[in-house]
Amino acid sequence: MASPGRRPINAPPGSPQSAGVPWLGLSILIVLVLILGAFVAYFFFGVGKDDDGKGNGGPGQAATGTTTEPVTVVGRTGGALGFPSVATRNTTRISGTDPVDISIAAAFAAYPASGPGSPPAAVTIVDANDWQSGIAAATLSALPVGAPILLAPSGKLSNDGADALAQLDPLGSPETNETKVFTVGKVAPPSGYEVNRLDGKNPAAIAAAVAREKAKLTDGPPNAFVVVSSEDPQYATPAATWAARSGDVVLFTGLDEVPPETLEVLKEKANKNVPIFVLGPPDAVSPKVLKQLEKAGGAVQRIDGKDPASVSVELVRFSSGLFGWNLNEPGHGYTLARADRPMDAIAATALSTGGTWPALLLTDSSDKMPQVVLDYLLDVKPGYESDPTQAIFSHGWVIGDDSIISVDQQAVFDDALELEMVETATTG
């Protein structure tokens, strides 16, 4: 132990330290700590904020793809960066409670507005409260049309939505007939754009208008029609994600009666041999409807399930010809959204047009993942034998903030997607 009269090894002769008076060094240390603290506070909470305190996308913003929601202290660790609520090893969250904001974030995630990525050919605008039009419009998100959905409050784009449309800067293409903006349902056209308006007197008529326009744009019928309830969105929303992935067309039915607008589409000559897939259990779409569909069009098959979460899993597993996700092996993408918030799933459909091409899984509460969804994910959990860097991986998008899907449920989701070492059997 050094005696009080000895100077530290690095203290110059004649310094206060050399005289046994450490106060100056301590003062310098305190000043440095205060400067560092001020820098950290500025970097995480000050950068990217305007005079009114609103963020403009700097490091103090949540990784949501929008520019309106600052990071909050969330998660069990209480980290100022928002982890693990923003992202974990295998999940990324699009936060927020407003589907309008979620649609903007998803569109920017699919089509980054800066960098070398190409803008979308077109954008589709849908009323934020019109889930039927949103589901019908999802087929336009798929290539070759490539028109992600932006949601409009009360049928008119918000200022943020108008800014997002300008940043996305759709260019038009031969596949969109040079159209830059589609509107589906009752939507006010945005100023400055020529708009292709697809509308009708009811959901079935709107879906029929989308089906006919899609046939014109792609010069032929879809690979399949998906028929869903126009009255029960919880069973219908998985069709939107599949339509955005595949380009298949969604049509609507009632519980016991198929609307004439739907039957007319199915009876068209070009559609006679297109297979029809009904999504949902008999209490959403009755057997009477299946018989009416069989008379009007091609072969009919039901994708069943006892509840919305089960139906979403069945569609993820399903395969028939070119229809169905057929995700029965490890290494895929998923979105996790609330079944009772259909506009969240619709808002996120742009994610399923590329990247990891995520399929929709539904959860029925904020806190707990449905057992059927967890069992499925554990069944296709990725693994490796010796080298994890050569393995395949899964990824999940979490749709909504932690009041909609909690951090604990996100952690369960992450763990189910996590790559795991697999022990190989040895022979004696």
Image (cartoon, rainbow, N blue to C red):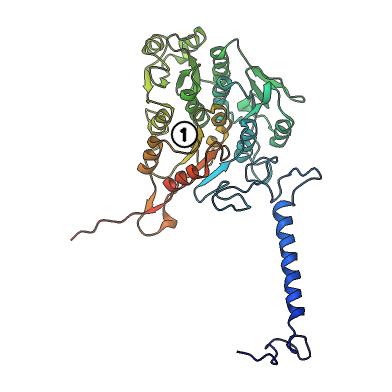
Q: Quadrant of residue 194?
A: top right
- Position in image of residue 347 (x %, y %): 58, 31
- Judge from the rendering whether residue 224 lies leftward or rightward of residue 351; answer left or right: left
Q: How many marks?
A: 1
Q: Nearer the viewer, residue 379 or 297?
A: 379
Amino acid at the residue labelled 1: Thr
Picture residue at 69% right of the left edge, 92% below the top = 6
The answer to whether 418 is drawn above or below residue 131 in the figure is below
Quarter of the image for residue 109 reads top right
- The furthest residue to the front: 4
Of residues 362 and 29, the one drawn nearer to the viewer in this rendering = 29
Q: Quadrant of the C terminus?
A: bottom left
Position of 166 with respect to 205 (left or right) is right
Residue 404, relative to residue 140: is it above or below? below
For the residue pair 422 and 18, the one nearer the viewer reads as 18
Which residue is drawn at the image coordinates 45% and 38% (left, top)?
A: 368
Residue 179 in sight in this render = no
**How far from the left and from the top, in percent, is residue 352?**
53, 35
The image quadrant of residue 156 is top right
Looking at the image, which residue sits at the far right?
Answer: 51
**Residue 89 percent coordinates (x, y):** 50, 51
At numbered mark 1, what does the secondary structure look like: helix, strand or loop? strand
Q: Residue furthest top?
A: 260
Residue on which the image places disc 1: 363
Q: Whole-percent x and y of residue 165?
A: 70, 32
- Residue under the image location 54 percent in, 19 percent down: 215
Q: Residues within 10 Å of mark 1 (few under 14, many from 20)?
A: many
